[in-house]
Image (cartoon, rainbow, N blue to C red):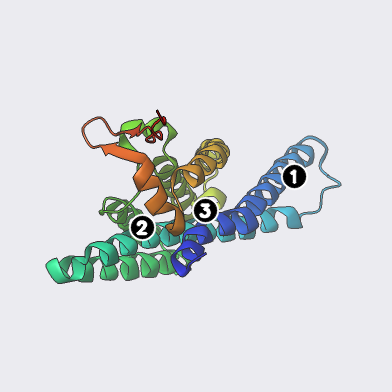
Amino acid sequence: MEAKDVILLLHPVFAVIIVFPLIGIVVNRALQTRQRRLETKATGKSKIPPVVGQEHVQLGRWLTGSVVSIVLIALANDIFVNILEKQVWKKSPFQVTFIILLFVATIISQILLYQAKQKKWRAIFATLTGMGLVILGCQDGIYRKTDQWYISHYYYGIAATLLMIFSLAILPEIYKDKSNFWRKVHITFSCIALLIFIVQGMTGTLSLLEVPLSWQEAYIQQLYQQNCNTQTCIIQAPSLPKKSE
């Protein structure tokens, strides 16, 4: 494999090694935290240790950071491969500069979101981080499959990431709110995000089958003729040897 192939595989590798194990642990801690809360409310005590709540919060913060990071890796790979192959920096240097600054601004916004204490600043940095991801996702070179959005790894990934960012931003409000409104919002969004992550396991596998490695591109281009109007690939039948008379 070439270097570009290794970079291409960083996103799925990090997802398998870091993100999906974290999802399992976070869900486990969430169920234990809820079970302990219910048992304590009913009987005044629980065998589940109090530390599970703190672990759930800490691991959830790590999960959000990991999800944002692998999304940025995937976006950076597609965008900069497109820039290099089409020499965009020569045609539009301002666009390339803007993209680089946008990556930097998104990363800084995510870091500041972790540090922010006041509600308004958490809302601002969460919004900036989400906007940065969405704008970067609109750049040329991103493998979006807009015509088949219902099985698009990109659209589900962005949706799950935005939900994770929002959950991180409202985290302090969960413990301040006596009405449990924000807790219910957090549970609802987390359940939706979990379902999306399950779908991501399938759409991600599909994307790995559809996106060729560098050594496969030339061969695939010879076999397939791209129809830009219908977004379908027509297989060209190989020429058969002539029969000897």
At label 3, counting other C-alpha atoms closer than 10 Å, the crowd grade (few under 14, some 14-19, many 20 or more) is some
Q: Which of marks 3 and 1 is nearer the N terminus?
A: 1
Nearest the camera: 227 or 237? 237
Q: Which amino acid does label 1 sit on?
A: Gln
Residue 130: x and y in percent read: 35, 53
Residue 78's disc is 2
Nearest the camera: 110 or 180? 110
Q: Earlier in the sequence, mark 2 or mark 3?
A: 2
In the depicted structure, whether residue 5 falls above or below residue 193:
below
Nearest the camera: 216 or 229? 216
- The residue tagged 3 is 171
Residue 22's disc is none
What secondary structure is found at the residue carrying circle 2?
helix
Asked if the residues shown at circle 2 and circle 3 are in contact, with their CB atoms under 8 angstroms apart, the answer is: no
How far apart are labels 3 and 1 at the CA level? 18 Å
Residue 154, by quadrant, is top left
Residue 139: x and y in percent read: 26, 54
Residue 103: x and y in percent read: 33, 66
Residue lying at 52% horizontally and 64% vertically, measured from the top left: 1
Residue 120: x and y in percent read: 35, 58
Residue 32's disc is 1
Q: Which of marks 2 and 1 is nearer the N terminus?
A: 1
Asked if the residues shown at circle 3 and circle 1 are in contact, with their CB atoms under 8 angstroms apart, the answer is: no
Residue lying at 57% horizontally and 41% vertically, measured from the top left: 201
Residue lying at 52% horizontally and 46% vertically, measured from the top left: 177
How far apart are labels 2 and 1 at the CA level? 39 Å
What secondary structure is found at the residue carrying circle 1?
helix
